Amino acid sequence: VALNPATGEILAMVSKPSFNPNRLEEDWDTLVNNSNSPLFNRATQGLYPPGSTAKVITAESALKERIVQPNTIFDCNGTLPLGSDYVLREAGQVAHGKVNLIQALAVSCNITFGQLALDLGRAKLAKAYERYGFDQMLPDFELPETRPQLPDFSSLTDGEVAQVGIGQGVLVTPLRMALTAAAIANNGVIMKPYIVMQITAPEGNIVEQFRPQPWLKPVSSQQAAQIKEAMVKTVSFGTGRAVRITGIQVAGKTGSAENPQGDTHAWFIGFAPAEKPEIAVAVIVENAGSGGSVAAPIARKVMAAALR
């Protein structure tokens, strides 16, 4: 999904495998019996764990609740024991050592964000997802949308709370993660997404004109700026280096979401140019592994084409 964060205008929406709409009648039987579900619009209806792209929400919420400052130091030794039977581990068995919040987001430190989720607690973590609209349907959106699935936060174990902090245990659509990126890009405001710009009569008269409308303001402009800085550093020296575009500052966050049905999903969310965003994107490649190596290069091509 690609959209204009300042207006909510959907610039591009792709779901694969796809189909030829000009041959829908002829191919109908084949399409409906295809196990890969090409008629299913994954962009608005597919539900996936967001993985580390959700660390943007965890980080912003921790700032909002004054649990941390951007320069707060964390010490990542690669593991976070929780209770008697669960240990949250760093991806690739690495230890990031001492990192501040900005650096932790850039290198996608699981230990930092698992701990931040625990520091936030169940009620504030739930409130964070509600602020971004994950507990409600999009207003007046033109296409069928699947509502995100949030857990019963009050019943989560400490291990499950930590998992939510790193983007596991919740299910979201790619469109919703594009809107999350757009919130940071647009100084904290999510605009209502829309596809149709205007409806005209056969003689050319404009019947209806769709105008940009704010939907939610989940984050203050100050905290949006702080998260934007971290997302810029994610691209400049962190896990999102594959999305860099010559001459354009890009902000982003990668994700590799564990998937109980198969291999890890590869994610990237971001926007560009960082200083005055014209496009926000969310890319997920099912069962493809690393967001930094698989999803980020796709996002780069989309943003580069839009800004050409």
Image (cartoon, rainbow, N blue to C red):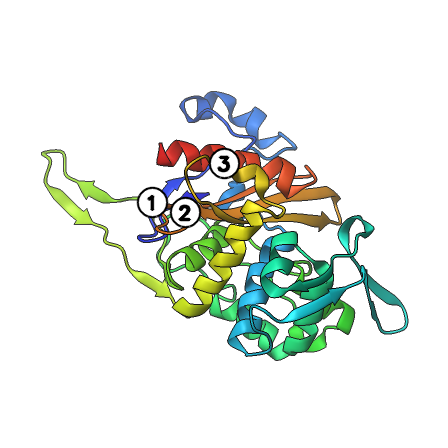
| Residue that appears at 58% across and 66% down | 59
Query: Mark 1 or 3, which is nearer the eye?
Result: 3
- Upstream in sequence: badge 2 or badge 1: 2
Provide the secondary structure element on which disc 1 rests. Answer: loop
Task: Examine the rendered structure and indicate whether residue 72 appears above or below residue 36.
Answer: below
Q: Position of residue 63 (x, y in %)?
A: 54, 72
Label placed on residue 143? 2
Label 3 sits on residue: 300
For the C terminus, the quadrant is: top left
Residue 118 located left or right of residue 131: right
Q: Is residue 243 visible?
A: yes
Element type where label 2 sits in the image:
loop
Numbered circle sitting on residue 277: none
Image x and y of residue 164, in percent: 67, 64
Mark 2 to mark 3: distance in Å?
Answer: 26 Å
**How many tags in the picture?**
3
State the image coordinates of residue 257 (x, y, percent, origin top left).
Answer: 68, 49
Q: Amino acid at mark 2?
A: Leu
Q: Residue 158 at x, y = what percent?
A: 76, 73
Q: In percent of the image, x 58 and y 44: which residue is there?
A: 240
* Mark positioned earlier in the residue sequence (1 or 3): 1
- Callout 3 environment at 10 Å: few (<14), some (14 to 19), or many (20+)? many
Q: Of marks 2 and 3, which one's residue comes earlier in the chain?
A: 2
In this rendered view, identify the residue nearer to me: 205 or 98.
98
Crowd band around label 1 with a 10 angstrom C-alpha radius: few (<14), some (14–19), many (20+): some
Residue sitting at 50 percent across and 27 percent down?
A: 19
Contact? badges 2 and 1 (CB < 8 Å): yes
Q: Secondary structure at mark 3?
A: helix
Residue that mark 1 sits on:
195
